[in-house]
Image (tube, rainbow, N blue to C red):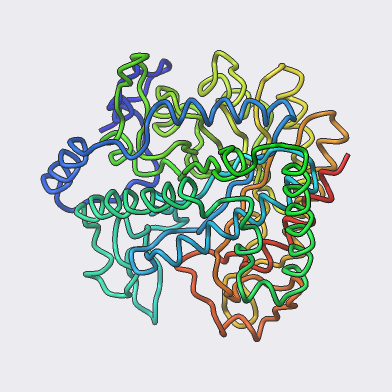
Amino acid sequence: MAVMSDQPPAWTPSSWTALAAEQQPEWPDPQQLKAALADLAAMPPLVFAGESRALQTQLGRVAQGKAFLLQGGDCAETFAAFGADAIRDKLKVLLQMAIVLTYGAQLPVVKVGRIAGQFAKPRSAAVEQIDGVGLPVWRGDAVNRLDATVEARRPDPSRLLRVYHQSAATLNLLRAFTRGGFADLEKVHVWNQEFVAASSEGQRYAVVAEEIERALRFLRACGVDVTNDPTFHTVDFWTSHEALLLGYEEALTRQDSLTGDWYDCSAHMLWVGERTRDPDGAHAHFLSGVGNPVGVKLGPTATGDEVTALAARLNPDNVPGRLTLITRMGAASVGDVLPEVVRAVRDRGLAVVWCCDPMHGNTFLSGSGYKTRRFSDVLDELRSFFAVHAQEGTVPGGVHIELTGEDVTECLGGAQDIADMDLAYRYETACDPRLNNQQALELAFQVAEMLRP
């Protein structure tokens, strides 16, 4: 049983267990869980401390308005949807979005995926009704199966090991793509997937790609060695996920041999969610002790005092790039709630990255029974986010988007004008609706316009 006190316990990788930990599964076999976590603790790290430090340096530039953060990927990764093509297509969309943002805003873009670890989901209820039968809720493939049976919904610790191995394979492929030529600027046209190339967004992207190719030809004519300069042929691509299952995160936490600091080596960046962001809770306590850059999701109930308490817990030394505040307040609420929170952070001189998640606050159930979001609401929240920061004299540093590289029909609207009746055509998400490839590219063009000086 967790013991609560006014002062948090001295930090160790396991000290979170002395505090209240929300959204943890009820594992039926403690010995099986213990064995799985011991196996994980013996595994090599998925990422390295030096990589996380490099990301924090880049995020420090974002906090200063000298770069922009693009964070995106699946709502929840699944074992079934795993494959090289799916990873490649998500990377393609993020690279296309980054090109549009860099070209339009004339800013470097820090590219962070919701990938290689986003396998667990917080839920609003422990039980759900399916065809009149109450079943334990699906908590992501890290915990149980989506199939609507009692056995499938039983938490299984062996799935944590599968998360590790799939994350390792995903990271291996991402590193090959981003370092092995796939991310070459001279291949910007190749990224224009067939189903995007035929769209109006794909045609706009083709114009940008042609301008980039013209610029590269100009640099060659001026004597710049474009062919051998790695700046033009590789990209930094970082991984992130919600640090929800604290046993898994603890098992992959390692002490850096160079600095002696602790790092959560499951991802380059971790965040604490809206449901688990209690400054005195186990999740904030755990992340307070690792050296990774960290984020916090802030919903419409967030207050300035709560956010400054979180900053004091997670970034007591006020290091630029250490803390990203990811607002997810909804198009109807952001204009009323965000200004007070921004002023509280600004007036205390806190160095943070402000990032907008325009997805989670705009979810609703459509008439046909699908959980969905309106693309227009997503854009409205983004516009309000930028407007508040312009009003308060602060930096709108990034966007956090749930998206896929597939041509799904999960969010309403956009240039394709997806309607309620279209949702059933390709509604493939395991949890929350994602922007498809065309909508994601359309959003990038819109954000680039918002970033123009």
Residue that appears at 48% across and 25% down:
53
The vertical placement of 215 against 414, above or below, is above
Residue that appears at 77% across and 38% down:
222
User: In the image, 29: left or right of 117?
Assistant: left
Residue 125 sits in which quadrant? bottom left
Q: Position of residue 79 (x, y in %)?
A: 33, 64
Residue that appears at 75% across and 30% down:
65
Q: Position of residue 295 (x, y in %)?
A: 54, 35
The vertical placement of 150 against 216, above or below, is below
Residue 299 sits in which quadrant? top right
Q: Position of residue 137 (x, y in %)?
A: 37, 63
Residue 16 sits in which quadrant? top left
The number of numbered badges drawn on the structure is 0
Residues 84 and 182: in front is 182
User: In the image, 35: left or right of 23?
Assistant: left
Residue that appears at 73% across and 73% down:
413
Residues 194 and 350: in front is 194
Which image quarter is the C terminus in? top right
Which image quarter is the N terminus in? top left
User: In the image, 410: left or right of 157?
Assistant: right
Q: Position of residue 217 (x, y in %)?
A: 74, 49
The vertical placement of 408 against 67, above or below, is below
Residues 295 and 404: in front is 404
